[in-house]
Image (cartoon, helix red, strand yellow):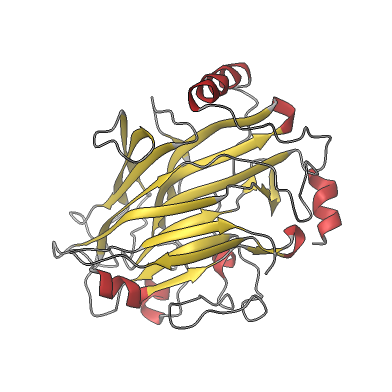
Amino acid sequence: MKPSTLVSLLCTSAAAVQAAIPSSAHRNNLNQRSQQHQNQQPRLLHTLSPSHLSAQTKAKTLSQSLSLSQAAAESVQGGAIFTLPTNKSTITSITGTFTIPHALVPTTGPTANGSASTYAASFHLSIDGFPSSSSSSAQCNTGGAALRAGIDIFYDAAAGGEERPFAWYQYAPSSSAVGFANFSAAPGDTLKFTLSISTSTSSGAGAGAGAGVVTVENFGPGRKATKPIQTATATVVGGGQALCGRQAGWVVEDFPLAGLPDFPVALADFGTVTFGALGVGLDSGKKVGEKEFVAGTGLVDINLEAQGGRLTDCKLVRGGGGGGVTSQVRCARVVGN
């Protein structure tokens, strides 16, 4: 799709980006607008398709950084994907922490300066759901099942600017994304997600027969709090579709808007997001360590020609010593090279 076509499909008159406002005032403003536009708030269509990360989409690794020309296949996902070696058992849980960014209007590229009416971005964790070159993983994950949870951010010019983030969970593709009950968050809040899959009813095809538990904890503004100010937990079922338990992802994604499924929404300018406190638990009771994590992790970037080419620059930031995973995944919003 040509950039002019995308802009014409998304285009309406949009206000310029407002200056940043203090956190407490911004939170109150979001609450008021949320009540006023509760039935009109935009929502993303949390699709699950192998085309999101086609076999031709090449991952950047620590030992080989690919240029945009080498990884020219389009992708709506950016971030890090860890694949468990075939000689290991299965992944049963993953964790990750990040601070919710503001949703802003891009200042460069085909969707810049309010040329689209709605901008959005999704940040989520996922167990499975990513295409694999491994024949064993591909066979196990034929149904494309994934357990995932995250947060969506929006800038809606028609509603007056930035909308309240939407915290959700999903067992894809058998169910749609569902909002966490009695849970709210605002830009600047630090969230921790924990995803766990059941092994008690394993079908033998993977890690569980379609059941999982997702938890989100809100530690409020900043990263210094040690106790969450709010927690929500949900149990999800997948209609009998078992997960493989071979992959874990910390992802930035450009989903389509609900009602407009044919193309991704204009990606919001989110600055930089860092996924930290990464954890991968195995059914053996052990956790994946730093060395194994780095060796098994590939990086991908959102790449959409209609919006200007490469839209994220995702990297692994190596951590120090200690047990478990110490690296972080950092994704910055960019346009082109």
Q: Quadrant of the N terminus?
A: bottom right
- Say left or right for 73 vs 252: right
Q: Report which quarter residue 80 is drawn in.
A: bottom left
Q: Is residue 208 visible?
A: no
Q: Decide: is 298 above or below 107.
A: below
- Say left or right for 87 vs 185: left
Q: Is residue 283 visible?
A: yes
Q: Report which quarter residue 120 is drawn in.
A: top right
Q: Please name the residue shown 48% across and 70% down the image.
A: 299
Residue 128 percent coordinates (x, y): 39, 62
- Say left or right for 104 vs 27: right
Residue 300 percent coordinates (x, y): 52, 68
Q: Please name the residue shown 22% across and 63% down the image.
A: 324
Furthest toward the left, the residue is 285
Q: Report which quarter residue 132 is drawn in.
A: bottom left
Q: Decide: is 33 above or below 313.
A: above
Residue 137 percent coordinates (x, y): 38, 74
Q: Decide: is 66 above or below 176.
A: below
Q: How many marks?
A: 0
Nearer to me, 67 or 132: 67
Residue 104 percent coordinates (x, y): 64, 41
Q: Please name the residue shown 51% across and 58% down the image.
A: 331
Q: Decide: is 304 above or below 263.
A: below
Q: Quadrant of the C terminus?
A: bottom right
Q: Please name the residue shown 27% across and 51% down the image.
A: 196
